[in-house]
Amino acid sequence: MAGEMDKAKGSIKKAVGKLTGNKRLQNEGSIDKVAGKIKSGVDKVKKALQGK
């Protein structure tokens, strides 16, 4: 769940950064998206190891 929220937050930051020409915000958005993907992957592995 936290991973999905980070991915959404990253997408929004990246889009706002593009609209405003703010490269730093675009980069932060990209980082948040990657962090969200990693968190989602870790959650999937945890669930698989727990047998859920």
Image (cartoon, helix red, strand yellow):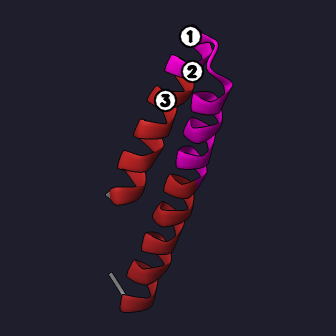
* Magenta-drawn segment: 16-34
Query: Which residue is at 48% across, 64% downward?
Result: 39
User: Local crowd at mark 3 within 10 Å, few (<14), some, or many (≥20)?
Assistant: many
Q: Amino acid at mark 1?
A: Thr
Label 2 close to label 1 by CB (< 8 Å): yes
How far is disc 3 from disc 2 in space, using C-alphas?
Answer: 6 Å
Q: Write down the residue under mark 3.
A: 13
Please, what is the three-letter code of the amino acid marked with disc 2?
A: Gly
Name the element at disc 2. helix
C-alpha gap between disc 2 and disc 1: 5 Å
Q: Earlier in the sequence, mark 3 or mark 1?
A: 3
Q: Is residue 38 above or below residue 46?
A: above
- The reply to whether the magenta stretch includes residue 47 is no
Residue drawn at x 36%, y 90% as measured from the top left: 50
The spot of residue 46 in percent (x, y) is: 43, 82
Q: Is residue 21 magenta?
A: yes
Where residue 18 appears, x then y in whole percent?
Answer: 61, 16
- Evaluate if marks 3 and 2 touch, with contact meaning CB atoms under 8 Å apart: yes
Q: Quadrant of residue 43?
A: bottom left
| Quarter in which the N terminus is drawn | bottom left
From what the image shows, is residue 49 above or below residue 30? below
Corner quadrant of residue 19: top right
The residue labelled by disc 1 is 20
Which residue lies under the disc numbered 2? 17
- 40 or 23, which lies in front? 23
Q: CA distance from mark 3 to mark 1?
A: 10 Å
Magenta stretch secondary structure, dominant:
helix
User: Residue at horizontal 50%, vertical 18%?
Assistant: 16
Q: Secondary structure at mark 1?
A: helix
Could you say whether the residue bearing mark 3 is in a helix, strand or loop? helix
